[in-house]
Image: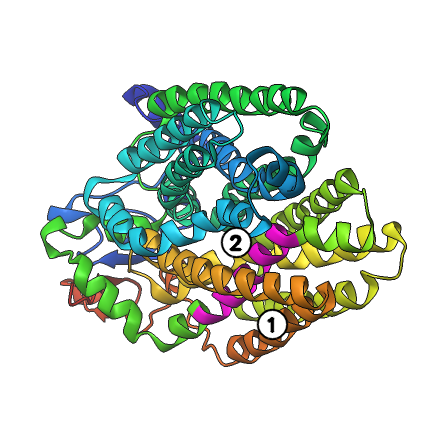
Amino acid sequence: MVEDGSEEEEGEAEGERGEMLGASQHNGFLPGKEAENGGPGGCAAVGAGGVQVETRLSRRRLAVLAVFSCYSLVNAFQWIQYSILSNVFVHFYGVSFTEIDWLSMVYMVAYVPLILPATWLLDARGLRLTALLGSGLNALGAWLKCASVAPGRYALTMAAQAVCSVAQVFILGLPSRIASVWFGPAEVSTACSVAVLGNQLGTAIGFLLPPVLVPNTPDDVDLMAHNISIMFYGTAIVSTLLFFLTGVVFEEKPKYPPSHSQALLQAMPPEDYSYKQSIINLVKNVPFVLLLISYGIMTGTFYSVSTLLNQMIVTHYVGEEVNAGRIGLTLVVAGMVGSIICGLWLDYTKTYKQTTLIVYILSFIGMVVFTFTLDLGYLIVVFVTGGVLGFFMTGYLPLGFEFAVEITYPESEGTSSGLLNASAQIFGIVFTLVQGKLTTDYSPRAGNLFLCAWLFVGIILTALIKSDLRRHNVNSGIMNMDVKAVPVDNPAERETCTALKIQSDL
């Protein structure tokens, strides 16, 4: 395998060992140019100006994925650290539960108006700058929190959390972009799952660690402040380290594209791209709009359950704050396993719609079971049902990203992912507010039934999505409506080699 920046001799040696994707996965389709002795059947990927483009995997891709997953983890940890200790922070800052809930919901509120500028920046200025902004703002927000460790400084801790929420805008849309730009067709879904996994792991640690670091000590506010400061300073130090690692590891793209679909996109002249037209194309794409709504419902449900989990648990199990965190951990860790399994399954089968629909149905069933077993009085039952719910519900997240990229290719992965996340934030805000009101005024069951009804709507919408796997078709050599067959110049090759060009109004 060839790493970016390696010497020519090393690259040739690695190519002879069969590490090149183009040699092993060539599909014979080219971006509007004739093949010139480049692979089986005389076909090769060709870039701008008729220059042959090699497709290789870079070793750096693993470091990029690892660093991104780590700073995404820290951002997710900062999202959930307040709500899992809602009763502690209510006492410490002297505010209501609703005001503490807003420390989580600010992530959702900030995302919606900022997602379009953020995706424009990703397309216009690239992956590296976006990654540096995400990790840098994450560290800045963490340090601001360190200054808010005192009763009466709720406004400052809200401002710090707002900075972290802006960082999230530059983080959540990157998994599918990193996977597509850096990883080959046989591993792209798994890579996206791992990138999403980092965020889920941060949520899991956010459920587990804060209740341990900051136990509820209502009679000793000084001890409470000391414990909170340990949590905040630790987070700030880790965030700063990851910011510097991002600067060292991240590059805009590998030296060679990892797949034919990426080679086609990179062959397009930059001046032909229009961000406005890309948004218009996505809005007109009916399958994507259906996925946009169904993804928002599923992920918004997850956000709402995660935010209100502590309140639901302590309503039926008084004094079980630590176990509430452990149940949240179980929910997310099970979802991490689900994410990896779903990613591997997609890479193996490419059954995007079928897998997405089945996982959606099982998430609905898991939510129903969780709803009706929450108040039975047995925490072990809640652990089991929470784990089942998490396995399917959080396992769905990378499925939505990858399905969106498939049905919207060649549109930017960052734009489609960003719109999906914006939908999730909007639904998350509404669901959290409504479920929180129903939980407070009636019972946790009333709030959960509200979510179950919406998940059922999401199942119907998912079933209506037309599965048009455009990116997979390009990588496999199957033409669809966005990729036209163009006869090559040499008549002798017309039966064995077809040149492709991307038809776009961008």
Viewer-proximal residue among 505 and 288: 288
Residue type for callout 2: Pro
Residue type for callout 1: Leu
Give the quarter of the figure containing the N terminus.
top left
* Label drawn at residue 455: 1
Residue depicted at x 59% and y 25%: 228
Which residue is identified by label 2? 398
Residue depicted at x 32% and y 52%: 115
Residue depicted at x 36% and y 32%: 137
Viewer-proximal residue among 167 and 41: 167
The answer to which image quadrant residue 394 occupies is bottom right
Prevalent SS, magenta region: helix
94 left or right, relative to 170: right
Give how far across and how far down residue 427 sits, in percent.
48, 64
Numbered range of the magenta stretch:
293-308
C-alpha distance separating marks 2 and 1: 18 Å
Give how far across and how far down residue 184 sits, in percent.
43, 45
Q: Earlier in the sequence, mark 2 or mark 1?
A: 2
Give how far across and how far down residue 135 sits, in percent.
39, 31
Residue depicted at x 83% and y 50%: 317
Give how far across and how far down residue 362 sits, in percent.
69, 67
